[in-house]
Image (tube, rainbow, N blue to C red):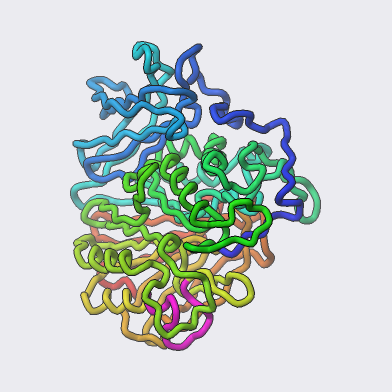
């Protein structure tokens, strides 16, 4: 988002405190050092993750501290009796010692226990201690579904604070035992250095765990890799990852604030000015750090995709960053590229029409009707502040909304993050300048651990009203000061109702909306 401003201390000069991590293979300092590393054997101190889970498959991720063979064992019970073994890749420096193993033929709607072993490639009998995780496969029938979502992690210089125990919001999300977590972009702040300490408004000091890679903006592949590894220093996040699968999308801060393809930077912090070069390096690090099946470290894999989670839910994960046109005032009367690009737009229209799920949740990395600025003249998201007929990127969204209405596609709900506060918007053609669409809801939440910011203005083109908003009154409010939020979605397996709860960083419910199948706009 446009909130690229750091704390009052210098963003370039980063102090390295005693908590600094010296090397890429160092064990995370917040946790009591798990007994992973046996002498001379591979260790997996960065934990495990599961991702892109379906009714019969999942993808398991691990990072080793040296070259190793990845082995995954799965079982229906924690005892691992009658375990099934999966032989994964040989991990090494070409993937930053990360590996992923695809699991197939799993039973639907069941709890899957897994453990990852790392074996010495020269002596397979020498393995480190196993690292355990679990996840639930998607149901085959109408069963309850629950997931959480948010975005924006370690932004504006607010990193892992050991005095607060790190990212505590992940522990509150974990206790809800969701089926999965949707991370709605800004998974890292590659353009945001993490200083060792920050002077808090009103007095006091915020302390950060720091690393060498996070001492400056990320430019090299090694620095991007370090930016993605940074968050895994938090034991709350690693514990969460071991229990809750992640569906991840990316936005701007994985590369640089408000970037767009073809941009040439004038930021003096960067020696590499071509943002396309930076984006390619970040995309590779992103693909290495998450269990994401559509990405390949050396390929041109995409982030946008649809995940089928039983008969009640299809999740459409968008990429509003990679295919957009340049940020501008957004007032052009024609715009074929827009914010999605034509290929992604046609894919989304086609997949929405094919979907037979009761609910089609569209995971957008940016909001539709909130005016997100990029400097004094340009806009960063879709809306540009003109409440009249669609212009600029709004034209592409109008085409999509018209398609949804005319194809009689029901059950669409939009989820997003990006603006660093939480709100609910209902879009109604009766109030809109553009009226050829069916009413729908959009829910915003976040950040996870970043500066909280005041609410931005609504754009009237698609007729939004805002029955709920909670945002700080001033800019860059640090975590722990009523400025962090996440959302929960629960779908009832019996009646099919979808309930959205917007929660604060301690898990308290701030707003609830129940949507009925076939009447989502009401």
Residue 389 position by quadrant: bottom left
Q: Nearer the viewer, residue 30 or 342?
A: 342
User: In screen coordinates, is 150 left or right of 515?
Assistant: right
Residue 335, image x, y percentages: 40, 78
- Does 327 appear above or below 360? below
- Does 123 appear above or below 280? above
Question: How many marks are shown on the rendered structure?
Answer: 0
Q: Nearer the viewer, residue 44 or 378?
A: 378
Residue at screen point 35% across, 86% down: 435
Q: Is residue 313 magenta?
A: no
- Quarter of the image where the N terminus is located: bottom right
The residue positioned farthest toward the right in the image shown: 203
Residue 15 position by quadrant: top right
Residue 491, image x, y percentages: 31, 56
Q: Is residue 245 visible?
A: no
User: In screen coordinates, is 141 left or right of 177?
Assistant: left
Residue at screen point 58% across, 47% down: 218
Residue 40, image x, y percentages: 49, 13
- Quarter of the image where the C terminus is located: bottom left
- The prevailing secondary structure element of the residues shown in magenta is loop
Residue at screen point 61% across, 29% down: 29
Q: Is residue 86 visible?
A: yes
State the extent of the magenta-drawn residues as a range: 382-397
Residue at screen point 29% across, 34% down: 112
Q: Is residue 388 magenta?
A: yes
Residue 143, image x, y percentages: 24, 50
User: In screen coordinates, is 370 left or right of 267?
Assistant: left
């Amino acid at each position: 988002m446009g909130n690229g401003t750091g704390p009052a201390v210098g963003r370039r000069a980063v102090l390295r405190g005693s908590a600094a991590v010296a090397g890429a293979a160092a064990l995370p300092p917040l946790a009591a050092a798990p007994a992973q590393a046996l002498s001379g054997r591979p260790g997996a101190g960065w934990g495990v993750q599961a991702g892109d889970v379906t009714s019969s498959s999942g993808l398991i991720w691990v990072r080793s501290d040296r070259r190793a063979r990845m082995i995954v064992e799965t079982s229906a019970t924690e005892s691992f009796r009658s375990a099934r073994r999966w032989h994964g890749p040989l991990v090494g420096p070409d993937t930053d010692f990360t590996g992923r193993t695809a699991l197939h033929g799993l039973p639907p709607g069941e709890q899957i226990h897994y453990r990852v072993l790392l074996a010495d490639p020269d002596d397979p009998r020498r393995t480190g201690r196993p690292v355990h995780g679990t996840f639930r496969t998607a149901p085959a029938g109408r069963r309850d579904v629950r997931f959480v979502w948010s975005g924006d992690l370690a932004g504006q210089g607010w990193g892992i604070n050991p005095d607060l125990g790190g990212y505590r919001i992940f522990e509150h999300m974990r206790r809800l035992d969701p089926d999965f977590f949707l991370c709605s972009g800004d998974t890292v702040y590659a353009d945001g250095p993490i200083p060792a300490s920050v002077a808090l408004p009103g007095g006091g000091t915020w302390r950060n765990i720091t690393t060498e890679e996070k001492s400056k903006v990320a430019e090299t592949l090694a620095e991007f890799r370090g930016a993605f590894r940074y968050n895994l220093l938090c034991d709350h996040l690693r514990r969460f990852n071991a229990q809750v699968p992640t569906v991840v999308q990316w936005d701007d801060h994985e590369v640089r604030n408000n970037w767009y393809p073809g941009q040439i930077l004038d930021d003096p912090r960067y020696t590499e000015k071509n943002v396309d070069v930076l984006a390619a390096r970040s995309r590779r690090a992103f693909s290495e750090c998450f269990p994401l099946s559509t990405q390949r470290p050396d390929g041109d894999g995409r982030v946008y995709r649809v995940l089928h989670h039983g008969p009640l839910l299809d999740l459409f994960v968008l990429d509003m960053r990679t295919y957009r046109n340049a940020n501008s005032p957004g007032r052009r009367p024609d715009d074929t590229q827009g914010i999605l690009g034509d290929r992604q737009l046609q894919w989304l229209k086609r997949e929405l029409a094919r979907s037979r799920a009761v609910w089609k949740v569209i995971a957008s990395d940016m909001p539709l009707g909130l005016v997100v600025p990029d400097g004094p003249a340009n806009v960063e998201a879709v809306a540009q502040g003109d409440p009249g007929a669609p212009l600029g990127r709004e034209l592409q969204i109008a085409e999509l909304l018209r398609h949804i209405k005319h194809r009689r596609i029901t059950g669409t709900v939009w989820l997003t993050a990006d603006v660093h506060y939480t709100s609910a918007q209902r879009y109604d053609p009766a109030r809109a300048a553009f009226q050829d669409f069916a009413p729908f809801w959009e829910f915003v939440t976040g950040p996870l651990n970043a500066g909280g910011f005041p609410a931005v203005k609504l754009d009237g083109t698609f007729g939004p009203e805002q029955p709920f908003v909670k945002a700080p009154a001033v800019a860059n409010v640090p975590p722990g000061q009523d400025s962090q939020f996440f959302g929960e979605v629960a779908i009832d397996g019996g009646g099919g109702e979808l309930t959205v709860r917007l929660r604060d960083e301690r898990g308290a419910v701030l707003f609830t909306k129940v949507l009925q199948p076939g009447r989502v706009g009401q």
